Image (cartoon, rainbow, N blue to C red):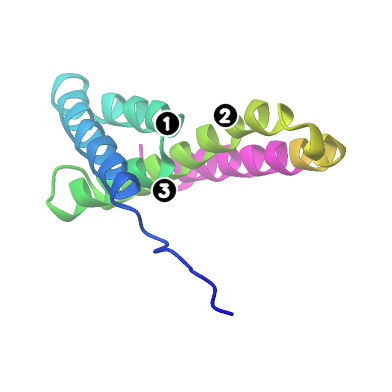
Amino acid sequence: MSIDVGSPVSLRKVANFAVLFLILQVVATLGQRWIGNAGFQIVSLLGGLFSSASTTAAAANMAMHGHVAQSQAGVAVVLTSISSALINLPLVQRQPRLRSQMRELVISSVLQVIIGIAILFLQVRLVGLL
């Protein structure tokens, strides 16, 4: 008996990631040009609502090419992670079989968000990254 295991990487998933990455790259670049670091961070926060992986890749790419400072890209990744964690809560809550784990997920997500914000605050106050 053989089991047919398909490829873990589908062309559709790769194409979706590429399109999101391209859109986020363009919007983040425009945000950086028009508004400065705040524009880049706003796009990163909003990008996490759609795809934290694509947003993180776009921030890393911009830092690698010198469009934003590495510290700014790091802050962007934290903001992306925070928004991604929060947007997942309503998605998980819709799943009836996961409702019993909702309380733990909410507590864990809120703790992650608080820690992320605290770290960003400390960076601003102690290191002056923003």
The question of residue 118 being in magenta is answered with: yes
Residue assigned mark 3: 127
Locate the C terminus and report the quarter of the image it occupies: top left
Distance between the alpha carbons at the discs numbered 3 and 1: 30 Å
Q: Which mark is residue 50?
A: 1
Q: Secondary structure at mark 3?
A: helix
Left or right: where 63 falls relative to 56: left
Query: Which of the two discs, 3 and 1, sits closer to the camera?
Result: 1
Distance between the alpha carbons at the discs numbered 3 and 2: 29 Å
Locate the N terminus and report the quarter of the image it occupies: bottom right
Residue assigned mark 2: 87
The reply to whether callout 3 and callout 2 are in contact (CB within 8 Å) is: no
Seen from the viewer's position, the closer of residues 23 and 46 is 23
Seen from the viewer's position, the closer of residues 75 and 61 is 61
Distance between the alpha carbons at the discs numbered 2 and 1: 9 Å
Query: Which of the two discs, 3 and 2, sits closer to the camera?
Result: 2
Q: Position of residue 22 (x, y in %)?
A: 19, 37
At 40% from the left and 26% from the top, the residue drawn is 46
Left or right: where 78 falls relative to 115: left
Of the image marks 3 and 1, the number of the one nearer the N terminus? 1
Q: Which residues are magenta?
A: 108-130
Seen from the viewer's position, the closer of residues 92 and 104 is 92
Q: Dot 1: within a 10 Å radius of its alpha carbon, few (fewer than 14), some, or many (20 or more) residues?
A: some
